[in-house]
Amino acid sequence: MGTAEHVYSKTDQSQLEIPPGLQAFYERRQTDEWRAMVNRLDALRKSFADQRRQIVSPELRDRIANIASAGMQDDPRGPGLRYRSLVEAKNAEVDLNALKRLHRHAYSEVGELVKGQEAFHHHETVVGSVVDVFKRPPIVYVAPDPDKEKLFFPPFGGCWDRLEQNQATGDGLIVENRSYLDCAGRMGSKLVARNNDASDVDLLCAYRENGYLVPFKTLRTGILQVRADLSALLCRHHVSTYDEFGWSDFRATTRGRLVLAVFWTWEDVEPANEVSDQWFASGLDCSGDGESFPGTSIQAVPGERRVINLFTDMAFPAGRELWIYVGVADRIWALLNDVSIDISIDSAWQLNSLAVRSL
């Protein structure tokens, strides 16, 4: 299994296809979790849209938009669309303070749903970017003690493209949801979503997770420490927007997680324990009127090397043969109110090695 003592042959790899039962169960479970999240977001989207219509009816909204746009055509050197829209809204006696409070509350709820509450923590940088090298000295490599730790190298054998999910409303499109998993140590995904003609309130969501499984026999009773050594091939997150209406707004989030799951046997359909580094790629979290946006963010420079330590939150008895899964999960979310968007994650990582030990 690609350990320090043994490297898998092609024949070995062919025997390690992910069991259909495991794949089917995980897809059902994650689909249920994904659907629950999307349903909550969609309920929020519909509630947000309904409350907005009570403050500004669709007919009044269209009339304000037409008057503001006509003013732009009559005097292109005058005030912009946003200013003209707000002036017309005030002339129509729209309660803009109530509208602003509604928007703040809705986007705050979206943030709580999609970002989670885990605090930021630093990963260990072994050979990172030039900036990282000057900030802190590289960690000195120490060969593993075979009585305490087992080291795995690619190819890992248990190659798992674990899950793909998409959701879009209105004119939104998930343009691409592609895996970079090559069963030779590479993992990651490319997610691209666009909405070039957002309606009153639209939702975009895309998710992908993939990684590798390795076997490990516990040496003592205790929790497990799994150290993943990775090199970035590319890691770009992007959000660009366009204000379609003049007083529009949006909330968008991208995030990359490193996931650890432990299975009792190869045939198990549910992990005994699953944890993740929520800030492996901290991503983008942005909101506003659509007139400003973060653009492209390089989350890790090509060749940047990271070592991440993940710990199970339950103990395992000594002498048990387990299967350890480590993978990357990428996700994008966007809630749009008359804002066009181009949002994407393009992230590929090489898993150089995995070290597993009982603590």
Image (cartoon, rainbow, N blue to C red):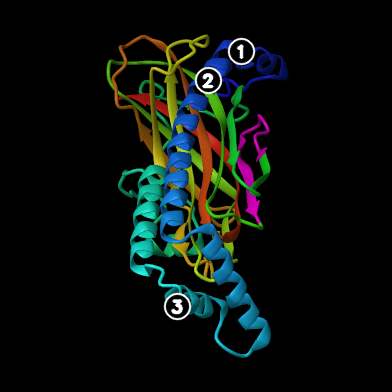
The amino acid at mark 3 is Asn
Magenta segment, principal secondary structure? strand
What residue did someone put label 1 on? 20
80 is higher (above) or lower (below) than 357: below
Residue 215 placement (x, y as % from top left): 49, 17
Res. 191 image quadrant: top right
Q: Which mark is residue 91?
A: 3
The amino acid at mark 1 is Pro
357 is higher (above) or lower (below) than 14: below
> Which residue is at the front of the view, 64 or 41?
64
Q: Are marks 2 and 1 in contact (CB under 8 Å)?
A: no
> Which residue is at the front of the view, 121 or 92?
92
Which-is-in-front pick, marks 2 and 1?
A: 2
Q: How many marks?
A: 3
Question: What residue span does the magenta drawing correspond to?
Answer: 178-195
Measured in 3D between alpha carbons, the distance from the residue under mark 2 to the one under mark 3, in whole angstroms, is: 52 Å
What residue did someone put label 2 on? 28
Residue 236 placement (x, y as % from top left): 58, 55
